[in-house]
Amino acid sequence: MSEKDQKPTEKRLRDARKKGDVVQSAEVGAALVFIVVLAAVASQASHAVDMLRGLFDAMFAVVSARDPAAKLSTILALAMHDTFLFGAGIVVLAGVAGLAGSLAQVGGLVAFERIAPKFERLNPAGGLTRMFSLRSLTNLVKTGVKTLILALTLWVLLRGSLSAPLQAGYLRPDAILAITGRLLLTLVGWAALVFVAFAAVDYAYQHYEHMKKLRMSTDEVRREHRETEGDPHINARRRRLAHEQVFNALQDRVKMASAIVYSQRVAVALCYAGKEALPWVAARGEGEMGRRIVEWGGEYLVPCVANAGLADALYESAREYQHIDRTLYVRVAKLLRWAQGDDDVVH
């Protein structure tokens, strides 16, 4: 079996995509979810602080209430309600971000072959095999590396930023909150950068693995070319038949021509139906086809004359079935009179 050292063809990539085999990195979705959730939490930070302040004020007010138990239950119910709404919004945003991450990578792809139920997926032995496969081990290593990098990054940041929070105990509460907020913003900002960098590296790795998996051997490329383009011998025969049909149709038009004018490069056969009509190009050809037109004209006794200037002008100014150019009326009229025996040879 030949070595698979050829890049996958467009057809192979399309077939793989139809089966759901596309480049996709889970880290891209995770990074997008993290950033979206982080942005949502940051945008609602002031609202959350106001909620906490109101909750603390209400809790302190419970102490002086006549019925602390009833008041406390009401406060807790409101707190749970607000927390649920906030958490539900975050969950919805995370789901939308994850879906957007998948769509950005694979587009609107629905591969029924991927989602169709298969018996081997229910086989415990197959599940164990997939669990300890090279792909699973690779994903485990990637998760460990990402966690380690994230932990080291946060540790370095905390180590250099702990002095301000430690001294904040002597400050006002609003100053403590501001210092803590800046520290948290720095930490999550660097965490987001780690997520994005790791997502970019993982996507490049997944793309490399995908292209490597779909590599083809030289025999596979040739076989696919034969299947899509057809056998070369059959294609050559089809081209030959098509060429013959073109020549046959051209020969029929030469047979009905009124005159043929040619040069060393081209030949043009003209048709003229009478005084009420304009001459038109029945056939034109260059090189071998031009020589064929002159030969057929001799066979069918069509008047032929060598006139390089007129032949080149007709060839360049009009295509087949088109009337001749207005600027050539006089010269073509002289040619047609010669073809009818009324004038001397045209030069």
Image (tube, rainbow, N blue to C red):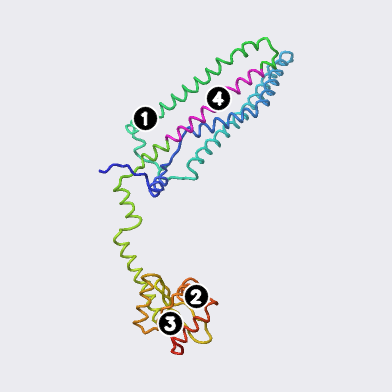
Dots 2, 1 in contact, CB < 8 A: no
Q: Which residue is mark 4?
A: 190
Do the numbered discs 4 and 2 sit on residues whose CB atoms are within 8 Å? no
Q: Earlier in the sequence, mark 4 or mark 1?
A: 1
Quarter in which the C terminus is drawn: bottom left
Q: Which residue is mark 1?
A: 131
- Amino acid carrying label 3: it is Ala
Q: Which quarter of the figure is the N terminus placed in?
A: top left
Residue 179 among magenta residues: yes
Q: Nearer the viewer, mark 3 or mark 4?
A: 3
**Which amino acid lies under the numbered mark 4 shown in the image of this protein?**
Trp
Residue range in magenta is 177-205
Label 2: which secondary element: loop
Front one among 39 and 5: 5
Residue 80 at x, y = what percent? 63, 25
Sequence-wise first label, 3 or 1: 1
Which of labels 2 and 1 is toward the front? Answer: 2
42 or 76: nearer the eye?
42
Q: Secondary structure at mark 1?
A: helix
Residue 81 tag number: none
Q: Mark 2 vs mark 1: which is more N-terminal? A: 1
Task: Mark 3 or mark 2: name the one nearer the start of the chain.
Answer: 3
Disc on res. 259: 3
Q: Is residue 87 left or right of residue 24?
A: right
Horizontal and vertical percent for residue 344?
Answer: 44, 87
User: Which residue is found at the position 39% from the left and 48% from the top?
Assistant: 15
Residue bearing mark 2: 322
Q: Depth check: 199 or 111 in front?
A: 199
Q: Amino acid under label 2?
A: Gln
Q: Position of residue 82 (x, y in %)?
A: 65, 27
